Amino acid sequence: MDAELAQWKAQGQYFDYLGFDVFYRCEGEGPALLLVHGYPFNSYDWAAIWPALTARFRVIAPDMMGMGFSAKPSAYRYTVADHADMHEALLADLGVRSAHVLAHDLGDSVAQELLARKVFGEQAYGGWDIESITWLNGGLFTEAYTPRLMQRLMSGTPLGDLMSPLQGSALSRRILEPTINEMFGPNTKPTREMMETFHEILEWNDGKRVLHQVGRFLEDRRIHRNRWVRAMRETSVPMRLIDGPVDPNSGAHMARRYTEVVPAPDVVMLADDIGHWPQIEAPEAVLEHFLAHVERVTASR
């Protein structure tokens, strides 16, 4: 395992979620900050901004079920609602009653569900306050989301089940890598070493075997779209979108849709060459705009 990834794992811990081990990192002092990672990797997505965040917040960053260093059962229904339950259970276990939220990709959908529960009084593990939300690139509005062909085939057709026995093979790597590469900006493509780290995250505990099952959250986005968007339109929680514009899935076109749907939208567009993983591709810019958002929220109270 890559040395930095191994260190990340060694500095984490586990909590019991419905009989499954869920990995998380919790570090720092100050206001609580919940980091909700995306698909298909894990909390290590936040590594580049972790030191700066933990210097100012009590940062809580779990790996979702089926991803990273958390349990990856094959007989499991990976839904956005279940991911939201897990995050609420972890916050309750840690005694957190309020937190800022920073979310990315699938994490945006999980944060939308968490927000909807707050707005509509449906929180599963007791009430907690959302101090602010910062969205990074993700499928906030399913009508504007344009997933890659391989993602649609693997998660929305029988192909995922058929190819499951081959996951982790040289063939599956050759299929997956172009999709990952396409999601990054033209000047921030992953190095060979970074790509190997991605594979180590995906393959830990035979994780690629359930990758297509976890990816079926696309249907949840369609089903819950109106409820999630209604919560975003009705909430008083301060929200900011920080967007990498050349992301083919949820770049500038998603930001435009955000400005059409969300009242008084707060949108920050990053440099024109930043893609789907802004916290990896432009960590300093993400930090700058995230901290400015939180500071403005804090100052207004």
Image: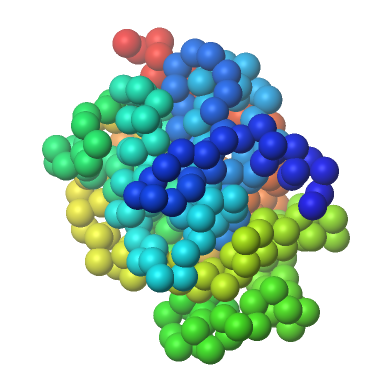
Foreground residue among 195 and 290: 195
**Which residue is drawn at the image coordinates 64% and 54% (left, top)?**
275
Task: Say above or below: 220 vs 148.
Answer: above
Q: Is residue 173 left or right of residue 95?
A: right
Q: Position of residue 154 (x, y in %)?
A: 51, 79
The answer to whether residue 90 is above or below residue 160 is above
Colouring style: rainbow
Nearer to me, 223 or 239:
223
Q: Residue at x 85, y 55 (%)?
A: 193
Q: Look at the image and tell me whether residue 79 can be seen.
A: yes
Can you give x and y, in whole percent of width and height, for residue 59 in the image? 53, 26
Residue occupying the point 16% across, 42% down: 122
Which of the pair 45/69 is nearer the observer? 69
**Above-or-below relation of 137 to 122:** below
**Residue 268 visible in the snapshot:** no
Q: Residue at x 37, y 30 (%)?
A: 93
Quarter holding the C terminus is top left
Looking at this view, name the residue that lies furthest to the left.
121
Where residue 125 appears, as percent x and y from the top left, is 24, 36
Q: Position of residue 13 (x, y in %)?
A: 57, 35
